[in-house]
Image (cartoon, rainbow, N blue to C red):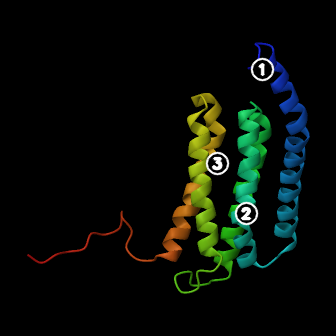
Amino acid sequence: MRGPGDTWGFILAAALVCGPAIFAGAQSAQSTVAAFQQRFDSDKDPVRRAKLMQQLGVDEFQAIRSDVNQGKLAEAEPILDEYRDQARTCVAALDAKKINASKHSSGFKQLQISLQEALRRLDEIDAGLTSEQQAPFLAVRDDLQRMNDHLVQELFPGPTLNGPATKTSG
């Protein structure tokens, strides 16, 4: 049976053992982001870049979540802005290729999934922030939502929910 002072000893021992592993994991996550960022920046094919957005988004949002949890909102915002700019670049490049996304969805589909996941992650992050803290995140969220809606329309063309109503005979 442990005595009352043993708990702090256990916590200290766990911190000494796990601390370096956590630090190494953080460095590994940063190097992973840097590796994907380098691949994204060097690849000029819009479809391949759009496909990279899924993993890049996962890594970037992990960094954003970490910064927000540590109260470093000023450090999280530029990462979010960068994700938005990368997504915007991908959407513009895919549009410029004049690809029929409903028939050739490669790249479009992965980018749309990445945007959908980003929107979900942003909603989770925003839930823990005050309305004042949310403002810059919500502005980016609006941009991401517009891009997501655009890609959904490209992937699934046809009448929109706000489009003309179909006439039924009766």
Q: State which mark lies toward you, 2 or 1.
A: 1
Give residue 140's mark: 3
Q: Quadrant of the N terminus?
A: top right
Around disc 3, counting alpha carbons within 10 Å, would you say few (fewer than 14), some (14 to 19), or many (20 or more)? some
Give residue 7's mark: 1
Give residue 136's mark: none
Image coords of residue 119 (percent x, y): 58, 52
- Front-lying residue, 59 or 15: 15
Q: Point out the tag, 2 or 3, that comes first from the N-terminus.
A: 2
Is residue 6 found left or right of 98 in the rendered image? right
What is the CA distance from the residue labelled 2 to the residue labelled 1?
40 Å
Task: Label 2, secondary structure: give it.
Answer: helix
Image coords of residue 144 (percent x, y): 60, 56
What is the CA distance from the residue labelled 2 to the residue labelled 3?
19 Å
What is the CA distance from the residue labelled 3 to the residue labelled 1?
45 Å
Q: Which amino acid, by three-letter code, is at mark 3?
A: Val
Q: Point out the tag, 2 or 1, that comes first from the N-terminus.
A: 1
Q: Which amino acid, by three-letter code, is at mark 2?
A: Gln
Residue 77 to residue 49: above or below: above
Residue that lies at the very extreme toward the left in this rendered image: 170
The part of the image, by quadrant, that contains residue 72 is top right
Q: Which amino acid, by three-letter code, is at mark 1?
A: Thr
Task: Label 3, secondary structure: give it.
Answer: helix
The part of the image, by quadrant, that contains residue 125 is top right
| Residue visible at 80% across and 18% down in the picture | 6
Image coords of residue 44 (percent x, y): 82, 76
Task: Label 1, secondary structure: give it.
Answer: helix
